[in-house]
Amino acid sequence: MTANSGDTAWILSATALVLFMTLPGLALFYAGLVRAKNVLSVMTHCVAIACLASVLWLLGGYSLAFSGTGPLIGDLAKAGLVHVPRDARVGGLPESVFFGFQMTFAIITPALMVGAFVERIKFSAVLAFSGLWLLLIYAPVCHWVWGGGWLGRLHVMDYAGGLVVHATAGVSALVIAWAVGPRDGYPHVSPPHNPGMTMIGAGMLWVGWYGFNAGSALAANGDAGSALIATHLSAATAGLTWALIEYRRFGRASMVGLVTGVVAGLATVTPASGFVGPLGGVLLGAAGSLICYQAVELVKHKVRIDDSLDVFAVHGIGGILGTLLVAVLAARPAGGAGYAPGMDMVRQLGVQAIGVAAVCAWSAGASLILVLVLKRAIGLRAREDAIEEGLDMAAHGERAYNP
């Protein structure tokens, strides 16, 4: 089978867009939200995770996710791509292009968790947790959903990563935030040092998300176009909704709130983007913003876990919500693409609920074991004097801003 040149060109572009989401998009988004003395530490975490995840994806992550016929995990037949010929194909794409596209997903997923533990974690703990998490949690779930595993066989609908990316990262982020402990003075912490930097990062995430969701069509076709439109409209609606909530509550709408809403909408539409119509995107954006806003309040003030930059409340809850709502909004009368043969709305909702329960349980349980082992082996929390000085200097010997 000959590779389709148009599809290949689009997925090469989408791959660049998804990497752009992490570097520099996510790095800037998170860096603007922390104190000035920790800006470079957050950026360093994102760069280091991108490097580590790329190497691990080649050495075994890709093979565990996308080879073999087992229901739970792949095998190592494609480790290092040693036995993958250059003319190998995945659909109409060269397998090397598919590998690269999926690699950028494997980069951003652990990087999302950086927001949960900023300003107080050891750099060694970030690397150890992220690397092990990629192989032990992300790769199996990726296989379950996209690699021929048991959830895919049940016809679970996850177009671009509501389960694989957002639910795994969100739930695991909550676990590691609990294990590391809160920032000093929590819940009274310093405001973001540079909201403008956060806005720039959010804009990059929004643009990159076109590659994330529309690229998941794995072709340059109408499905990609439909996914892009639903993605954009969800983000736009969610931003307006979050701003309206703030205006009604505080009498003003903040820029940080507006872009947080945008990201909530992007996370919520991700699992549904290729299955719903434009109006479905609008509904997902509104619902995602409303529910994620309440989740932020719940985690910070009721559960009292210092998930510093709201990874669980925005990404985890958004991904879970979108995964459930796609069962309704994918119906053809709602403008969606319909269901797999033998499926209807009720059956699909049941499958989606099974997927959410299984992925959240695995992410939480495996992450808990992982953080407890690492806490005993190398420690998670930075020294208090390092936290006081700021992790930029204490961990990396640099400052974001020099006099």
Image (cartoon, grey):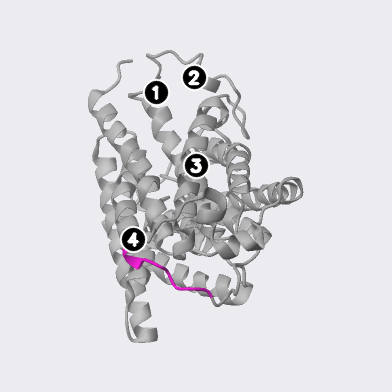
Which of marks 3 and 4 precedes in the sequence? Answer: 3
Where is residue 335? Give x, y as percent. Answer: 29, 54
Q: CA distance from mark 1 to mark 2?
A: 9 Å
Which element carries disc 1, helix, strand or loop?
helix
Where is residue 215? Give x, y as percent. Answer: 33, 39
Which of marks 2 and 1 precedes in the sequence? Answer: 2
- Residue 190 in the magenta stretch? The answer is yes
Badge 4 is on which residue? 197
Q: CA distance from mark 4 to mark 3?
A: 20 Å
> Does 92 sit left or right of 155 as displayed?
left
Q: Which labelled disc corresponds to residue 81?
A: 2
Where is residue 91? Give x, y as percent. Answer: 37, 25
Residue 326, compared with residue 14, is above or below; it is below
* Residue numbers of the magenta segment: 189-196
Rendered-image quadrant of the N terminus:
top left
Which element carries disc 4, helix, strand or loop?
helix
Q: Image quarter for residue 93?
A: top left
* 3 vs 2, front mark: 3
